[in-house]
Amino acid sequence: MSGGESVPGLEEALAAGLTEAEYGEIRKRLGRTPNVNELAMLSAMWSEHCSYKSSKRILAGFPTEGPQVLQGPGENAGAVAIGRGLAAVFKVESHNHPTFIEPYQGAATGVGGILRDVFTMGARPVALMNALRFGPLDIPKNRALLSGAVAGIANYGNSMGIPTVGGEVAFETCHSLNPLVNAFALGVAPVDRIFLARADHPGDTVFCVGAKTGRDGIHGASMASAEFDEAAEAKLPTVQVGDPFLEKLLMEACLELMRGDALAGVQDMGAAGLTCSSAEMASRGGAGILMDLDRVPQRETGMAAWELLLSESQERMLLVVRVGREREVERVFERWDLDAAAVGRITGDGLLRVRHGGGEVGAVPCRLLTDEAPVYERPRAAPESFPEPEVRAGELGEPADWNRAVLRLVGSPGLASRRHIYEQYDHMVRSDTIARPGGDAGVVRIKGTPLGLAMTLDGNGRYSLRDPRRGGALAVSEACRNLAAVGATPVGATNCLNFGNPEKPEVMWQLAESVRGMTEALGAFGVPITGGNVSLYNETDGEGIFPTPVVGVVGVLDDVSTLVRQHFVEEGDLVFLLGPDADDALGASEYLKVFHGRTDGRPPAPGLDAELRLHAALRSLAAAGISRSAKDLSEGGLAQAAVESLFAPDGSCIGASLALGDSVPATTALFGEASARALVSVRPARADALAAVAERHRVPARRVGRVGGESLRIRVNGDEAVGLSLDRVADSFLHGLARAARA
Amino acid sequence: MARRRFAIPVFPGTNCEEDVLHALRAVAGQEAELVWHQERSLAGFDAAVIPGGFAHGDYLRAGALARFSPVMEPLAAMAESGRLVVGICNGFQILQEAGLLPGAMQRNRSLAYVCRDVWVRTEETGSPFTAALTPGETIRLPVGHAEGNFHLPDRDLERLEAAGQVIFRYSEPDGSLTEAANPNGSRHHIAGVRNRRGNVAALMPHPDRAWEPALGGTGGLRLFESLVRWSES
């Protein structure tokens, strides 16, 4: 070991984010005091962001198995077989902390990172989605964060030529200082051409390819593992800058290389850069790596070893190349005008050894950086307010004017059409998008096959705040209901768990209960988790976010011609409401928030059995060509579902006349969010066929009206409650978000 | 009539080449090949379609770097010889930067990327994209761009109009020209133009994204039909 490095002590370890106990453990395990480079590597890899030390035990409860699962959690992305020898490769990941500091680059590099995770596996990315959370739009800063993040996401995905086909956005006060950006990517690969991030053959050559390494993003992993305070914006240098053009070249070069067999393993460089990618690859294969930092292509001069080790410069990959095949790799990257530098080799000693300036400047066992990082069982405690009392329609009183109530609700930022956002995303490139954003699920077909892939992202922080177990189950339920509505069968799920400070027992309880609820629903529907990401410490000045699990579910349409869209099709078609009756509960609903400014109460009870039967019925209706439109009921209830069904993506619209029964109060009949329900339209001649399918699946089906006319009319309990021209509905629903976002 | 052979120049950052390739081969029934931007010859090709994307990243002006790619030389020669050379979206911007088509693209009026369906009205039928259309015919096509705001100074614009070089304008479905129908603020609602001779043409909307009902529209079919008819004439 070269003697030039000063030896840091406890003070430096604490400053790097380690605890005193962790520092002691490191000294014990190494049998000595780590030098500055070793401490940098260890503190980054033992950060919450890289080690999952608070969440690991809880995540172990997720179902992860199924006959279709080709790759479960633990790799760059999950993979499931979808038929015809093909695999869907997908994952969702957060980029919350960087987005608050610099929304455009923070969100953009979130897209870049998740795309690398997917093409690293050998899959060509075919679709993107994103889940966003911001503070209320009446605050100018929040409008700037929203527009910056959307522009960043748009520019990255658009430049890459990958359509953004879906997602979700919500607005809550708790996100003013803690916005959330979760990015999802889906790719397709032949099942026998999936590449793993693994290095197990000593002698193989390690390449650093793509962008040059600079001083950007250093300590990003530690930044994402701590709360923010008023100095947060001073953390700007920890945010990386994205270059989608370079990533496009990197993607094409990698996919070209992956058609051959020169690669033994590959991993993208994300959090903790070279350190994380090399330690994880070697650790998975039980090997070691000797790396010469002097050979890493650099765009700045005089970078210290620890800076090179921790840099999170974007658009870089670490490749393990079979010995003797190096020239092939260099040729491919030369053609794409990209750097490809041999920076090290795989060894058999299990150590990550680092050379710099001609001498060895650090050596740490790879497993100490990865599997042997600490795991915590942190204390959990339910808040005293749990369980929340129900909020019932009767105690709230009724709106004076139902027409104005509907317009106000469907025009509110939480429920208005997301057109203002998704029109900034290229959602049609690749000419495979057969269900555009704005529907229950985005769907892309796979040319040359009859297959389609449906996907959706769902989560409701208000639900999870008031009852995290229900919130988790409802997120999974809604996602699977969305897929069923288009006719798809779910084959795998990914998740992004956005929570506050895990050192608070209440937050740990929220996390554990959320996972429990998700697990119960995933188990009921038979959907495995294949990967995901945990984002903790979403707190600023001690104020945390609503617990926000975001679930991404991917479904398969065996025959894309059976796809069902959500908009009404033709005058005279009959409208049916499928699922159990609503009750009189309005806890944690959009209605309660918009009209009463309240987020309290219990969210709806998940009815997993009713859900399962509804999903089966919706798929049967689609496969048999009975349903002409299908729209799930969720936030905003029946009124919202009806409004969304009026507008087709081609700009056309058609009215409907509905009549709702008298079993529940008008407020919940229109706006209640009871689960396991959907609105379906059929040709009059197929009404009996629908009834038969519903009966076979034991799903209640009630005829509630007819498609047609130039207005939306809804009778409730015999009264003509709603009578709105399509123009008025369109003005509120289609333009509400744009107005709020541009105000 | 024998099938024509189309070249599809691909620059680093181009991302619609597969869409155009599929549309030409499977939809229009023509021969088509991708051609890397460093090619110095287009021998054996009858025509070229420059696809959409972000050539060389488009960090400068869209298309500004692409004009220096080696393939632009044989492409210009192809245009000079009277053969069909057309551009879609980024292809339009590249042809402008190369001086093969008039005008320049400014950022959209909204300052944001816009991806949605628009309607265009056919202005004249002497171009490769409009040969099979009728004047005044309106077609629904998707757009996807951040810099599609067509600009020319007044006098040049008058000359362009007088020469009948405007092939498409953004319009309402009934053909009327309204501000709401113009997705990017283009002067005179211009969505597509041709050169004086008529063999070089381009438009911002994407016919390569609209050739079957499942994609949300079939407006692009008529444009590919036009390409085939024009190349046969």
Image (cartoon, coloured by chain):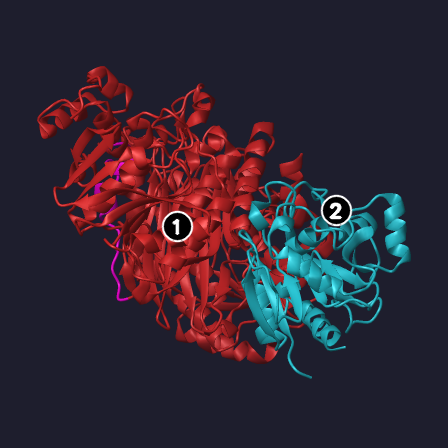
Residue carrying label 2: B104
Residue located at (64% from left, 79% from top):
B3
| Quadrant occupied by the N terminus of chain A | top left
Coordinates of residue A180 in the picture (x, y in percent):
45, 37
Report the residue at 51% width, 58% height from top: A440
**Residue at x 40%, y 62% (from the top left corner):** A188
Q: Which disc, if any, is residue A551?
A: 1
User: Which of A722/A110 is in front?
Assistant: A110
* Mark 2 residue type: Ala
Residue A737: x and y in percent read: 62, 43
B198 relative to A332 in the view: left or right: right
Would you place residue A596 above or below residue B133 in this image? above
User: Mark 2 belongs to which subunit?
Assistant: B
Q: Find chain A in the image and tell me its colour.
A: red
Q: Is residue A61 magenta?
A: yes
Is A572 drawn above or below residue B85 in the view shown?
below
Determine the main secondary structure of the stretch shown in magenta.
Answer: loop
Boundaries of the magenta span: A46-67
The chain drawn cyan is chain what?
B
